[in-house]
Amino acid sequence: MTFDPTNALTMTNVMVQFGDTVVLEHVTATLAAGTLVGVVGPNGAGKSTLFNAIAGLVPLEQGEVLVHGLPPEKVRGRLAYVPQKEDINWRFPLTAREVVLLGRVHKAKRLKNPNSNDRNLVDECLHRVGMWELQNSLVSELSGGQRQRVFVARALAQEADILMLDEAFSGVDFASQETLVSALRELRDEGKTILLATHDLTRLSERFDTVLCINRHVCAVGPPDTAFTPEVLEELYGAHGVTFSERGHSH
């Protein structure tokens, strides 16, 4: 296997099973590098499980996931994952800057004594997501949208080139969503690949280059304007899903 710069993720017949329950099956898709991908599906569709499978956090019953042509364990540093519920003790007084600095821990065990390279990179990451001015604020006191941007900055501090954000819009107001999307677009333009799981069908064609529609299996993958056929919406959301058709292309 060799490093593939053009394809960020290749999933082939991926199946994940917990006990007797099949959570994902027949998941096959290739996602090009340098794209902003919306991973869309109803609650319980397996979006979080897919991210965990890509990150190598859950075993595959069958199939294969390749990150830039290589198994996930070979390229851990290239992949950053912002899970749906951050594993942070909000009573512990971490500032935004300290959370971003956590992204450097896997590079060197020097969190308590970061070197100038670490500090400069953290500065840059905070600037890039528009959180520089709030760097000394406690994360527990930030809004949902501000927290999400801090977590994106932490992912950037890992120097990953693939970012996965699970339900990053959840509980985040519209203006903060747009700020986050703007920051993610800039990263995409620099060649990073971003996967953002969401069950919100609004403004997809404005926000994403590609959508991966999933409901235990891949229902469709491609540009939002062509992926959301009435058939795909019904596969995703059942008979009433067709009523989403207009909203799925809303502006």
Image: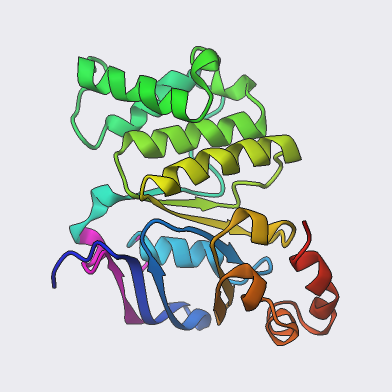
- Quadrant for residue 216, please give it: bottom right
Identify the residue at image location x=57%, y=31%. Answer: 147
Quarter of the image for the C terminus: give it: bottom right
Identify the residue at image location x=29%, y=65%. Answer: 6
The picture places residue 190, in percent across and down from the top left corner, at 37, 45
Q: Is residue 228 left or right of residue 39?
A: right
Asked whether residue 92 is drawn in magenta, I would say no
Give the vertical position of 87 relative to 146 (above or below). Answer: below
Q: Is residue 5 left or right of residue 228?
A: left
The picture places residue 155, in percent across and down from the top left corner, at 39, 39
Number of marks present in the image shown: 0
Identify the residue at image location x=13%, y=69%. Answer: 2
Q: Is residue 91 left or right of residue 193?
A: right
Quarter of the image for the N terminus: give it: bottom left
The picture places residue 140, in percent across and down from the top left corner, at 60, 23
The picture places residue 223, in percent across and down from the top left corner, at 57, 70
- Which residues lie in the magenta part? 57-73
Q: Is residue 88 visible?
A: no
Give the vertical position of 215 relative to 58 (above or below). Answer: below
Give the vertical position of 79 relative to 241 (above or below). Answer: above
Identify the residue at image location x=44%, y=33%. Answer: 153
